[in-house]
Image (spheres, grey):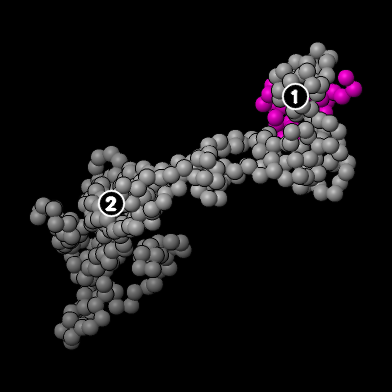
Amino acid sequence: MSKDYYEILGVERDATPEAIKKAYRRRAMKVHPDVVPDDAEAAEKFKELSEAYEVLSDTNKRAVFDRGGDPMAGGAGGAGFSGFGGGFPGGFDFTNLVDAMFGTASRRGPRSRVRPGQDALVRLNLTLAEAAFGTTKAIKVQTAVVCPKCSGKGGEPASEPVTCGTCDGSGEVTQIERGFFGDVRSTRACPTCRGYGTIIPNPCTECSGEGRVRTTRTLQVKVPAGVSTGIRIHLEGQGEVGPGGGPAGDLYVELAVTEHDTFRRDGDNLEMVVKLPMTAAALGTTVDIATLEAEWENSDVEDRKVAVEVPAGTQSGTRIALKGSGVPRLRGGGRGDLGVTLLVETPTKLNDRQRELLRQLAEERDESRPEAVAAKAGKGVFGKLSEWFS
């Protein structure tokens, strides 16, 4: 043989069918007439590649070629090429070329009217207490459901689909065009039945033949304790019903926790700032603080307040951690902490007696004219407080 099909495709003689297909796809895409039009050299190369692929992809023709025979002769089992001008006897199947070049299997037969539905995503807002302790919320979802009139069939009651007269039920039509290489056959979905192979003569008036209608459903969503913003709850089979009453997709509920006026969440911990009079900070005291449980109706009454012991001489910015009073952990047991940062307030409005008492205290402590001592630079107490309020 004058032609070495293995050399044309650039594969070894023991190449697998998959390797042959990949080699043809890679080379043919560079010289295809649609890629390099009006190029006689590329057209000749494309013809040569196609001939090599036809031989090596066919088990019988490849065996004949390997034995030194002519695989394109009539006895080799194929019509073969009759020359550049004559094209491909019997016509060239463009669908097979696409399959070889792009690795896709062409569809054969009608497609089903019943198809899976899409997933859906909704947003659910929660308070901090709901996110921390869990809740059950009702949500309304605009979605597609099976048509109640036709039960997803798409036709009026007692109306059955009929075979498409254009494609005879195959769902496809074949078009033959004479091109540069001869007759080119291309297959596409039937325009009459849109590839279904059947036609619904009397579409359902409720869903217009779609097999599904849109409606608003109310679902109960159980939110576990310890969730945070961005977490999604997966509800299987609660999404969109597919065309033709096909199986529903899934519903994803994305949670968003609103900011709280008092508490700031940091992971599983809660942080808050409590203002304290200067005298209480100096002498020490006990402060009753309302916890997050105070906003949760299912909590025990004794858990809705906690007593915080403030030692004498407490400075502004002191943080007291209350173990186990934070947010329940989403995965695993236990809870985070409740951090209480104390902000000591200096009185701004004093009567004469109060002013005199403070003056006497200052003289007693020799603080009438105190020396200013510069603090070290860096993010200290006031930096943290400024960050908190911002």
Determine which quarter of the picture holds residue 33: top right
Determine which quarter of the picture holds residue 82: top right
Which amino acid type corresponds to the residue marked 1 in the rendered image? Gly
Q: At x 28% / y 45%, what residue is drawn?
A: 329
Is residue 323 visible in the rendered structure shown here? no
Q: At x 31% / y 62%, what residue is drawn?
A: 258
Determine which quarter of the picture holds residue 93: top right
The mark closer to the camera, 1 or 2, is 1
List x then y, in percent, for residue 367: 29, 74
**Within 10 angstroms of label 2, few (less than 14), some, or many (20 or more) residues?**
few
Q: Which residues are magenta?
A: 1-27
Per the model, the C-alpha gap separating discs 1 and 2 is 55 Å
243 relative position to 105: left or right? left
User: What is the secondary structure assignment of the residue under circle 1?
Assistant: loop
User: What is the secondary structure assignment of the residue under circle 2?
Assistant: loop
List x then y, in percent, for residue 10: 80, 27
Name the residue carrying label 2: 148
Q: Is residue 299 magenta?
A: no
Number of marks in the rendered image: 2
Identify which residue, 166 or 368, lies in the foreground.
Answer: 166
Name the residue carrying label 1: 78
Q: At x 84% / y 37%, what residue is drawn?
A: 86
Is residue 302 visible in the rendered structure shown here? yes
Q: Is residue 12 magenta?
A: yes
Which amino acid type corresponds to the residue marked 2 in the rendered image? Pro
List the single residue furthest toward the left: 301
287 relative position to 388: left or right? left
List x then y, in percent, for residue 40: 88, 43
Establish if 368 lies above or below 106. below
Give the label on residue 41, or none.
none
Identify which residue, 341 or 154, lies in the foreground.
Answer: 154
